[in-house]
Amino acid sequence: MGIETSCDETAVAVFDSVRGLLSHEIYSQIDLHAKFGGVVPELASRDHIRKILPLVRVALDDARIEGSDLAAVAYTAGPGLIGALLVGGTTAVGLAMAWGIPTVPVHHMEAHLLAPLLEDDAPGFPFLALLVSGGHTQLVDVRALGDYRILGQTLDDAAGEAFDKTAKLLGLPYPGGPAIARLAEQSVGPQIELPRPMLNRPGLDFSFSGLKTAVMLKVRALESEGLLSEPVRADLAKSFQSAVVDTLVAKSCRAIEQTRYRRLVIAGGVGANQSLRTTLRDKLAALGVSVYYPRSEFCTDNGAMVAFAGLLRLESKMSKSLEVEAHARWSLQDI
Ligand code: KG4
Ligand code: ZN
């Protein structure tokens, strides 16, 4: 069983090493946090407490098994909101004690980067991973299970955070990524010029806060001239999305040149972005590189990726004893 509670999704899944995914349940807290324009940590923890055990029950029923049939309970041990992590961690450890089985603490970003392995067309090791979520933007050299080297990362905002903050500037609801992607589809006007941060600098690091500020200045200027119409907001959304996608694609190509890998995995919430997926696939196809990504529902936070990462760790004897682990900050390189 995999339990995910690191942020604003309560999720539970059951994965079988022979039969594959038997069940997966997600309860999203989006409606709870929407009116605040972002996740309120204390509300998140309290809601995880309300939802987690009913979701465990449904996940077991859907899988047609009992808790005592399980081999282990995996849970996201970090990085994430500490209170939210503790709900998942203490629940997992409590259930595992009752069922007499081990627990497997899982690194949230490792679970994201292994999620494409849940699909039929799974990449083998080694591969390059572009991890783009609400809290992280990283290019990772994935040599083997547990052997990760971060090649580049954001120096300030994560890509998802930039989507969320820019959406707020455009008056769009939380979470901003899907809202911006939807608005961008309405754009018929010309692209509005925005910077492509860090592209003219060597290396594989990212920076998105300047891009968000550039959008803010454009919004203010357009507003003061009374020109911020609905079509112009759509043009801004599309131009912002293109700037993020161009930056992620250019750095990914650079990392491919550096590593000479022939496989790239996109994972994390921003990996659900269609424009990013198609642009990366087309660009890298020209270089003879295959792009792998999980289905959209496994790009954003889910229990299936935690159950799967937990299974791989269990099979490699990397499981832990019955102690609750929760790390608000935790590097992939320190697993
Ligand atoms: O992986 P995730 O569900 O949670 C974290 O681990 O952070 O990622 C959430 C992030 C949010 O910032 C959200 O706006 C973004 O992923 N996101 C998207 C899309 N769907 C979710 N960003 C761009 N386009 C999307 N379609
Ligand atoms: Zn995530």
Image (cartoon, rainbow, N blue to C red):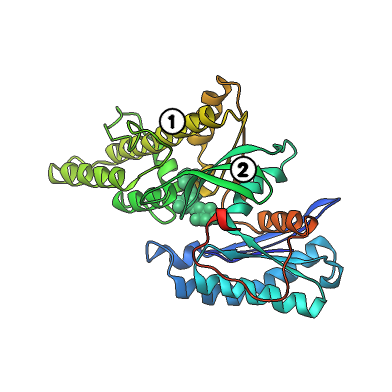
Most distant residue in the top direction: 286
Where, quadrant-wise, is the N terminus in this rendering?
A: bottom right
Amino acid bearing label 2:
Val
Work out whether residue 294 can be spotted.
Answer: no
Q: From the viewer's perspective, tell me whether residue 193 is left or right of residue 285.
A: left
Instruction: Tell whether label 1 touches label 2 (CB within 8 Å).
Output: no
Between discs 2 and 1, the one toward the N terminus? 2
- Measure the C-alpha gap from mark 2 to mark 1: 19 Å
On the image, numbered disc 1 is attached to which residue? 250
Of helix, strand and loop, which one carries label 1? Answer: helix
Foreground residue, 53 or 125? Answer: 125
On the image, numbered disc 2 is attached to which residue? 142
Q: Which numbered tag is attached to residue 174? A: none
Q: From the viewer's perspective, tell me whether residue 330 is left or right of residue 240.
A: right
Q: From the viewer's perspective, tell me whether residue 179 is left or right of residue 71.
A: left
What residue is rendered at 82% in x and 76% in y? 100
Q: Position of residue 54 (x, y in %)?
A: 69, 73
Amino acid bearing label 1:
Ala
- For label 2, the crowd category at 10 Å Cα-Cα, with few meaning under 14, some 14 to 19 and many 20 or more, is many
Work out whether residue 85 can be spotted.
Answer: yes
Location of residue 91 (image quadrant): bottom right
Q: Position of residue 236 (x, y in %)?
A: 31, 38
Above or below: residue 168 compared with residue 183? below
Where, quadrant-wise, is the C terminus in this rendering?
A: bottom right
Q: Position of residue 324 (x, y in %)?
A: 64, 75
The reply to whether the residue tagged 2 has its Cβ within 8 angstroms of ligand 2 is no
- Mark 2 vs mark 1, foreground winner is 2
- For label 1, the crowd category at 10 Å Cα-Cα, with few meaning under 14, some 14 to 19 and many 20 or more, is some
Foreground residue, 147 or 294? Answer: 147
